[in-house]
Structures are given as structure tokens and as C-alpha cells.
């Protein structure tokens, strides 16, 4: 009887063990909430995990080798987790932590052009907006500084890279430019030993800021960009009668004298005897060299004239240029170019009340 009782107890425990083995435990379910990164490049993201089902206690293994239930202070990215329960059941899930779009890099240039033809005194200053410092810089010159100085005319290509690998390339072009009081810009050309404006003056204010009288051809202001404006001698000289006066030219520049025009012409091949000839065409091919398409850089556009009566004429066929050298009290020396002539005219016959073009020449140092 005793043996039967022992056998019954043994069989009961075997039955319990068998039932336990056959029991189906609830599967592991994973859910979670994500707090995304607050700004680009930050590491303040979180994943708050919630596990249901399974048989506790649970253990965790994240793709970043973290073994905590929740992830704290993580960067943007994809994270997967393996969850194990006490019965060796396993479940896996993946969570994405995102971040805002990065602040774009922006480059702002401020610069000073070379002061004259052939000079190497230009400056480029750079301001970086957006992106993420520290930055690295590279110029097409090989320089790795942010700013450049001692520059000649040319195109300068700038590349900036931020700490997250964003790259921006931009360029700035330095030119040999002159700016008048109105903000108009003019190219500068070195012809021989002289520095000349590459376009006719089109300013509407004197250097001190007062308005001046000048005329766009046919009163069409759109023509002034290419052809410049036409001025009486008194307006061009800004009331002065001094040879070589600044007149309405930008500071550091002046209305060329008759002698300075002769120097230009002789540099282009005219003899002294030809340069001194009066009221005639002389010195071929200097006229061709001074016109648009010539090799001198002067690029005269054949801007025409305005008579004292207000009549505009000869645009496209003639160019008249004042000098600052008077011829008596009522007239002044001028230069003339004509489409049909390869010479340069030197005359003193028109009154100062005619309106002609003005080219400024730089003062000697």
C-alpha cells in the first residue's frame, strides 16, 4: 500500500511537469514612444519602450549595445532592440529617431576691387551664416583662410565645409572698377602710363552731392548706360575753369587736359607733330584704336552730341569729348572720333554750351 502511494505521488508530479511543458506562454509584444532629436546634430532623442506579454523578468539588447529598457540621449538614426523573457522567448522591433533639416550654409561676400589696372590690393571678406561650426575654408588660390587680401582682378572660388560635412561653393569676381557718387560703376583701363575710365561718365550729381545738368541722348535714360551722358563744358567742370580740375569726376580723378589727350594719342602711335595739329583729323590709326573693338581699351561708343538748342545728333557716327583746357573764354579743346575715319580730331571751334561726352582720367600719385 505504501508503495502504491509513493507511485501515485510520483505519477502526479510527472503529470504536472508534462502539463507545464505543454503550456503556451503569451508571446512578447513590443511598443514604444519616440521623442525625436530637437535640432540637427543634437543627441537628445529618446525611445521609451513598453513590453507586454512574455514572462518577466525581461532583458534587452539594443543595436547600439545598450542593455537598458529605454534609450536616452541618442542621435538621429534607426535603432533595433531584442527583448528576451525568462522563458527565452525573443521579440525584435525597430524604431527611427529623426532630426530637423540642417541649417543651410550661406556665404555673404563683401569686397573691395583693385584700385587700378594691374594693382593687387583688392580685399574679400566673408561672413558665414547657417551651418555648424567649426568651419574649414578653401580658395581656388590654395588659401585656407576665411578672408583674402592683396588681390588682383579675377574670379575667386570659395568652398566652406561645416562640422557635419555640409559643403557650399561660391565665387566672387574682382574687377578694376570705379564707382561714382550715384553708384554707377566704370571699368578702369591702363593705357600707357595713364589710367582711363573705360566708359563715358553718366553721373547726375557733383562730387559734393548737388544735382548737375546732363543729358541722356534723346532724353532716353536707357541709352545712358552704354553711351554715358552729355554735358556742357561748364557742367562737366562743375563751375571751375582750372585746367585739370576734378569737375564732376569721382574723387581722385579729373577732366583730362588737352596735353593728357595728346599723351594718350602719342602712346597709340601719333607723332608729336601730328598731336599738335589744330582743327583737323590727324594721327591714323589712333582713332581706330580708341573706338569700340580697338586694342586700346578706351572703347568709345560714338555717343553723339547735343546742340545749345537742344537738338541731339550723330549718335552712332561721332564721339565728342571735352578736355579741361579752355580756348579763350567761350570755347574749349575737344576730341572727336568718326566711324569713317581712323584718325582723331582735335578742335577748339564749338562753344562751351554744346553738350559732349566726358571721360575721366586718374590723378597722378
Image (cartoon, grey):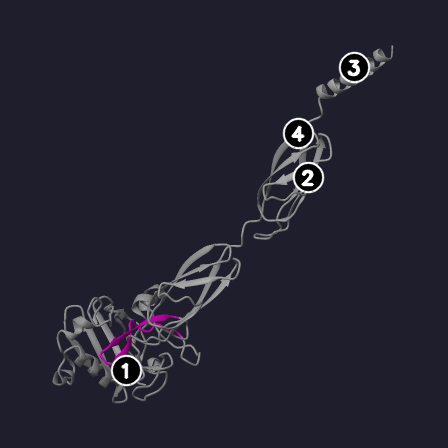
Mark 2 or 1 closer to N-term? 2
Residue 11 image label: 3
> Which of 27 and 319 lies nearest the eye of the viewer?
27
Give yes or no for residue 9 being in the magenta stretch: no
On whether residue 194 falls in the magenta region, the answer is yes
**Residue farthest toward the right in the current orientation of the protein:** 1
Q: Which mark is residue 70?
A: none
Which residue position is annotated with label 1?
A: 256
Residue at position x 75%, y 18% from top? 19
Mark 2 to mark 3 CA distance (whole Å): 44 Å
Q: SS of the residue at dot 1?
A: loop
Q: Are marks 1 and 4 in contact (CB under 8 Å)?
A: no
Q: Image quadrant of residue 282?
A: bottom left
Gap in angstroms between the C-alphas marked 4 and 2: 17 Å
> Around disc 2, counting alpha carbons within 10 Å, would you say few (fewer than 14), some (14 to 19), or many (20 or more)?
some
Note whether 145 is above or below 51 in the view shown. below
Q: Evaluate if marks 2 and 3 touch, with contact meaning CB atoms under 8 Å apart.
A: no
Q: CA distance from mark 4 to mark 3?
A: 29 Å
Badge 3 element? helix
Instruction: State how far apart marks 3 and 1 are (Cα).
Output: 126 Å
Direction from residue 149 to residue 32 in the image, left or right: right
Which region of the structure is painted magenta?
184-204
- The residue beneath circle 4 is 89
Label 3 vs 1, first from the N-terminus:
3
Looking at the image, is 295 positioned above or below residue 16?
below
Residue 49's tag is 2
User: Which quadrant would the N terminus be assigned to in this image?
Assistant: top right
Amino acid at each position: 500500500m505504501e508503495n502504491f502511494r509513493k507511485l501515485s505521488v510520483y505519477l502526479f508530479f510527472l503529470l504536472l511537469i508534462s502539463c507545464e511543458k505543454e503550456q503556451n506562454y503569451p508571446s512578447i509584444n513590443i511598443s514604444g514612444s519616440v521623442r525625436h532629436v530637437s535640432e540637427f546634430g543634437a543627441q537628445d532623442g529618446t525611445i521609451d519602450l513598453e513590453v507586454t506579454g512574455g514572462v518577466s523578468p525581461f532583458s534587452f539588447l539594443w543595436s547600439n549595445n545598450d542593455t537598458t529598457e529605454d534609450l536616452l540621449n541618442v542621435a538621429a538614426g534607426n535603432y533595433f532592440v531584442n527583448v528576451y523573457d525568462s522563458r527565452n522567448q525573443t521579440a525584435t522591433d525597430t524604431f527611427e529617431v529623426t532630426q530637423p533639416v540642417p541649417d543651410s550654409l550661406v556665404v555673404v561676400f563683401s569686397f573691395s576691387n583693385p584700385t587700378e589696372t594691374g594693382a593687387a590690393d583688392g580685399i574679400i571678406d566673408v561672413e558665414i551664416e547657417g551651418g555648424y561650426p567649426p568651419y574649414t575654408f578653401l580658395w581656388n588660390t590654395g588659401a585656407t583662410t576665411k578672408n583674402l587680401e592683396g588681390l588682383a582682378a579675377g574670379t575667386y572660388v570659395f568652398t566652406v565645409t561645416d562640422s557635419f560635412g555640409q559643403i557650399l561653393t561660391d565665387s566672387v569676381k574682382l574687377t578694376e572698377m570705379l564707382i561714382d557718387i550715384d553708384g554707377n560703376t566704370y571699368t578702369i583701363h591702363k593705357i600707357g602710363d595713364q589710367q582711363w575710365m573705360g566708359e563715358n561718365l553718366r553721373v547726375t550729381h557733383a562730387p559734393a552731392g548737388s544735382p548737375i545738368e546732363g543729358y541722356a541722348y534723346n532724353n532716353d535714360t536707357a541709352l545712358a548706360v552704354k553711351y554715358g551722358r552729355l554735358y556742357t563744358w561748364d557742367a562737366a567742370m562743375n563751375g571751375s575753369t582750372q585746367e585739370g580740375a576734378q569737375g564732376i569726376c569721382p574723387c581722385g580723378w579729373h577732366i583730362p587736359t588737352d596735353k593728357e589727350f595728346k599723351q594718350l594719342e602719342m602712346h597709340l602711335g601719333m607723332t608729336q607733330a601730328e598731336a599738335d595739329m589744330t582743327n583737323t583729323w590727324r594721327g591714323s590709326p589712333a582713332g581706330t584704336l580708341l573706338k569700340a573693338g580697338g586694342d586700346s581699351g578706351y572703347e568709345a561708343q560714338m555717343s553723339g552730341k547735343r546742340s545749345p538748342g537742344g537738338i541731339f545728333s550723330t549718335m552712332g557716327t561721332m564721339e565728342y569729348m571735352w578736355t579741361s583746357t579752355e580756348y579763350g573764354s567761350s570755347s574749349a579743346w575737344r576730341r572727336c572720333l568718326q566711324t569713317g575715319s581712323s584718325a582723331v580730331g582735335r578742335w577748339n571751334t564749338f562753344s562751351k554750351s554744346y553738350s559732349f561726352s566726358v571721360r575721366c582720367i586718374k590723378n597722378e600719385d
